[in-house]
Image (cartoon, rainbow, N blue to C red):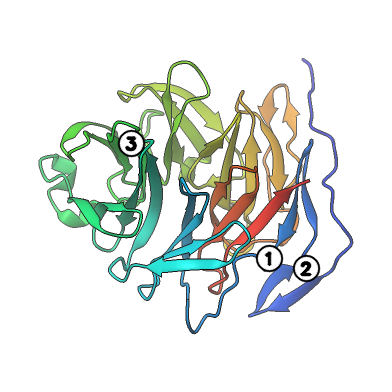
């Protein structure tokens, strides 16, 4: 059998590492990645005055239609922080989302809408870009799994241009719920179970338009995998990612990007990295992680190599190909930026 490996070494500058707020933080300017997907790190990009614009857990980030970068945090002094691409603060809003977790954007060609999941309030909200709540989704009590509202702990959404959307109940009963644009439930699938069609920590979801027929890619984090489903919920593919407890999939161009919260066999607090997959769902680069190696077309276990992150939770890839990283339970660290080199 043919042995194929990605053997290019990680490119790392010789800058040192220093301690800030008891965290290991690399110095500005280091370069990470492999196989032509290399990026220069800026740890100071999103840093703000913590007394005026605090963060708690930095959960997720998106880019809106104006090119701005929006961060969602469960800090109720300012749940949404809006930056320009240089990291300058533009605006903040939001005081009512104590469990703010998932952030998705709907571009309809005219205006942007946000979808926010709140794991504390057991709800999902559609808002205007400046925070007006337009639609609230409560627990789907008609489904037996959600007889108790507490069973609905939504972590992520994926939104279609026509306004329909999917909710991933990643901390609850593990169902994927499909709604029409008015918030009426159309379908559900997944849920807990042992078979591949079931999910365990369905933390993230996105629509994959890289092929002519759109599909859903859904996180199965405990099983270290992404799973591809048809739009109506039929399992099509399992993308195994050994060593990677992945968060939500983010697709930009031909590539899929994801934060790896941790490796399951290593210290929970200090084992995360960023992984990048190509159109064939092969890992091509790990920022802060070991170089991807395939043996007989099977990906070998990955792990953190450099101490860049504490619990990376999400990535946002902007229109210039730069990557922004939000981190959970990381000492209230602001987002980092990686610029392509």
Residue 244 screen position, x and y as percent: 59, 45
Mark nearer the N terminus (3 vs 2): 2
Residue 229 screen position, x and y as percent: 40, 25
Q: Residues within 10 Å of mark 1 (few under 14, many from 20)?
A: many
The residue indicated by pointer 1 is 43
Q: Secondary structure at mark 1?
A: loop
- Asked whether disc 2 touches disc 1, contact meaning CB atoms under 8 Å apart, the reply is yes
Quick one: which residue is furthest to the bottom in this view?
51
The residue indicated by pointer 3 is 193
Residue 81 screen position, x and y as percent: 46, 65
Q: Secondary structure at mark 3?
A: loop
Question: Left or right: where does residue 75 sit relative to residue 262?
Answer: left
Quadrant location, the C terminus: top right
- Real-space CA distance between mark 3 and mark 2, rounded to the nearest whole angstrom: 44 Å
In the image shown, does 320 or 55 lie closer to the viewer?
Answer: 320
The residue indicated by pointer 2 is 27
Please tell me which residue is depicted at 35% across the width and 38% down the height of the picture: 159
Look at the picture and state if 43 lies above or below 189: below
Mark nearer the N terminus (1 vs 3): 1
Q: Secondary structure at mark 2?
A: loop
Please tell me which residue is depicted at 56% across the width and 69% down the height of the picture: 330
Question: Left or right: where does residue 25 sit relative to residue 258?
Answer: right
Residue 164 screen position, x and y as percent: 27, 34
Rendering quarter of residue 132: bottom left
- Asked whether disc 1 touches disc 3, contact meaning CB atoms under 8 Å apart, the reply is no
Residue 57 in view, yes or no: yes
Question: Left or right: where does residue 124 sit relative to residue 330?
Answer: left
Look at the picture and state if 181 lies above or below 287: above
Q: Residues within 10 Å of mark 3 (few under 14, many from 20)?
A: few
């Amino acid at each position: 059998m043919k042995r194929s490996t990605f053997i290019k070494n990680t490119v790392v500058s010789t800058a040192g590492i220093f301690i800030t707020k008891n965290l290991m933080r690399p110095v500005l300017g280091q370069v990470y990645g492999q196989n032509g997907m290399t990026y220069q790190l800026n740890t100071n990009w999103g840093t703000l005055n913590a007394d005026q614009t605090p963060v708690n857990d930095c959960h997720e980030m998106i880019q809106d239609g104006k090119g701005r970068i929006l961060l969602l945090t469960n800090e109720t002094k300012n749940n949404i922080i809006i930056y320009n691409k240089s990291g300058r603060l533009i605006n903040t809003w939001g005081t009512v989302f104590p469990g703010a977790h998932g952030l998705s954007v709907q571009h309809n060609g005219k205006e942007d809408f946000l979808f926010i999941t709140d794991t504390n309030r057991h709800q999902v909200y559609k808002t205007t870009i400046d925070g007006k709540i337009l639609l609230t989704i409560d627990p789907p009590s008609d489904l037996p799994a959600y007889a108790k509202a507490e069973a609905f702990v939504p972590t992520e959404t994926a939104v279609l241009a026509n306004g329909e959307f999917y909710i991933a109940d990643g901390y609850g009963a593990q169902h994927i719920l499909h709604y029409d644009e008015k918030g009426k439930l159309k379908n559900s699938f997944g849920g807990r179970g042992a078979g591949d069609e079931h999910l365990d920590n369905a933390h993230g979801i996105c629509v994959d338009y890289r092929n002519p027929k759109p599909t859903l890619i859904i996180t199965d984090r405990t099983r270290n995998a992404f799973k591809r489903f048809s739009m109506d919920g039929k399992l099509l593919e399992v993308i195994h990612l050994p060593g990677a407890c992945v968060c939500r999939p983010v697709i930009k161009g031909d590539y899929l990007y994801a934060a790896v919260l941790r490796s399951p066999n290593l210290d929970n607090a200090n084992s995360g990295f960023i992984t990048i997959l190509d159109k064939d769902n092969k890992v091509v680069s790990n920022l802060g992680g070991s170089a991807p190696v395939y043996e007989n077309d099977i990906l070998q276990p990955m792990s953190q190599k450099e101490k860049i992150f504490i619990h990376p939770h999400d990535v946002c890839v902007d229109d210039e190909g730069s990557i922004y990283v939000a981190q959970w339970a990381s000492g209230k660290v602001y987002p980092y930026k990686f610029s392509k080199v």
